[in-house]
Image (cartoon, grey):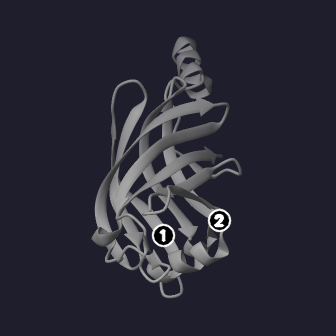
Amino acid sequence: MKALYFYLACLLFSPPLINAQQAYKIGKNTTTSVLGTSTLHDWESEVENISGTASFTLEEGSLKTIESLEVSFLAKSIKSDKSRMDNITYDAIKADDFPKITFNLKRFEAGTDNTVTAYGTLSIAGEKQEVAIEGTTSLQNNTVIIDGIHPIKLTNYGIEPPTAMFGTIKVGDDLRIKFHLEFTR
């Protein structure tokens, strides 16, 4: 009988091989940028206000599953080095009417070499699209890091590519969202 109690105590107090699902939030070192082209030059705008939460399960020091993930940023926190370009961007994405750009995870698939595919809904300018966003994951201490670049077409979100200088400068329809997401407990 003492052996049974000892065995149960070992099971209850030994560290698990699989960590239970744990809640994380976006960390301060997260960065996101929007990269695009125009008839004048390529451009890049940084996103200054990013928030999000996720729930991960880790197993033996690696990411096992993503149960939930939501990331959003304020549309008016997209900043370039030109305020006129920022205002054109805000008008194009209807930032006054739809102040947030969001991604909500629906399901997750792990690939090889720490690659992941996150399937979910991306909402921009009031339009929602089902997307598959690919990235790579890594762990540093208690931080889950997801890196990637996701292409989008403005017209898929009902956005007419912006123009300037009486239409002589036109933004390309294809953009890329580059992300480095750091989630901490």
Judged from the image, the secondary structure of the residue bearing numbered disc 2 is: loop
- Residue carrying label 1: 101
| Residue drawn at 50 percent across, 55 percent down | 42
Residue 149 rendering spot, x and y as whole percentages = 44, 46
| Residue drawn at 43 percent across, 75 percent down | 168
Judged from the image, the secondary structure of the residue bearing numbered disc 1 is: strand
Residue 13 rendering spot, x and y as whole percentages = 62, 26
User: Are there few (<14), some (14-19), or many (20+) residues within 10 Å of tag 1?
Assistant: many
Identity, as a three-letter code, of the amino acid under mark 2: Asn
- Choose between 155 and 13: the one closer to the eye: 155
**Residue 74 in sight from this viewpoint:** yes
Identity, as a three-letter code, of the amino acid under mark 1: Ile
**Residue 93 in sight from this viewpoint:** no
Q: Is residue 66 above or below residue 17?
A: below
| Residue drawn at 56 percent across, 45 percent down | 180
Q: Is residue 174 left or right of residue 99?
A: left
Residue reaching furthest to the bottom: 97
Compare marks 1 and 2 and give the one earlier in the sequence: 2
- Residue carrying label 2: 49
Tag 1 near tag 2, CB within 8 Å: no
